[in-house]
Image (spheres, grey):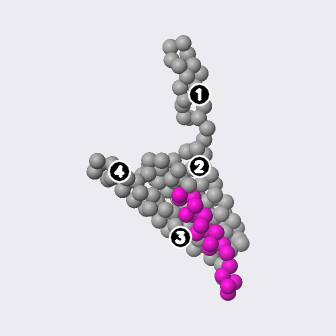
Amino acid sequence: MPERGTETAIRVGGAVVAVAAAVLAALVESFLVPFHVGATAVPLAGVLAFALNWALASLAVWWVRARWAVVLTAVAWFAVVLTASMPTEGGSLVIVSSTNGYALLLAGTAGIAVSLWRYFRPVRAAAPTPDEPAKEIRQ
């Protein structure tokens, strides 16, 4: 019986670590929005958002051993990014309306969408043969 408790603890701990990593990634990406090289805006935040959202979702599914963990990282990332997009009472913004800001929002959402599609896509049945009945396969 202690093995089941250990496995549950690892799964819960994995979920907590994945959510914390998604929050940290969103914070770092949010503060990288104004990144420029000389006078050229570089969408580094967008690239990181896509890659990290996809990777953190896969890591969360691996740790938790359930595909719903994708939703945990997505909600955590969206909560931070949407909060950083809202102006404060003084009018300050972390994610401003710029090409890099839009790239962050679009690329991060695309990374989450790819992860959701990967783990929640429909399963199609293989064509049955006389020797084998129909089986469900994932592509």
Give the distance between the C-alpha atoms of the residues marked 2 and 4, in whole angstroms: 25 Å
Chain-order first, disc 3 or disc 2? 3
15 or 33, nearer to the observer: 15
Give the distance between the C-alpha atoms of the residues marked 4 and 3, in whole angstroms: 31 Å
Check disc 3 and report the residue beneath it. Answer: 28
Image spot of residue 44 (x, y percent): 59, 65
Check disc 2 and report the residue beneath it. Answer: 116
Predominant secondary structure in magenta?
Answer: helix
33 or 89, nearer to the observer: 89
The amino acid marked with disc number 4 is Glu
> Crowding at label 2, few (<14), some or many (≥20) Cα neighbours within 10 Å?
many
Q: Which residues are magenta?
A: 72-91
Give the distance between the C-alpha atoms of the residues marked 1 and 4, in whole angstroms: 32 Å
Chain-order first, disc 1 or disc 3? 3
Image spot of residue 104 (x, y percent): 63, 64
Give the distance between the C-alpha atoms of the residues marked 1 and 3, in whole angstroms: 42 Å
Locate the C terminus by quadrant.
Answer: top right
Check disc 4 and report the residue beneath it. Answer: 7
> Crowding at label 1, few (<14), some or many (≥20) Cα neighbours within 10 Å?
few
Q: Helix, strand, or loop for circle 2? A: helix
Give the distance between the C-alpha atoms of the residues marked 3 and 2, in whole angstroms: 23 Å
The amino acid marked with disc number 1 is Ala
Is the C-beta separation of discs 3 and 2 under 8 Å? no
Chain-order first, disc 4 or disc 3? 4
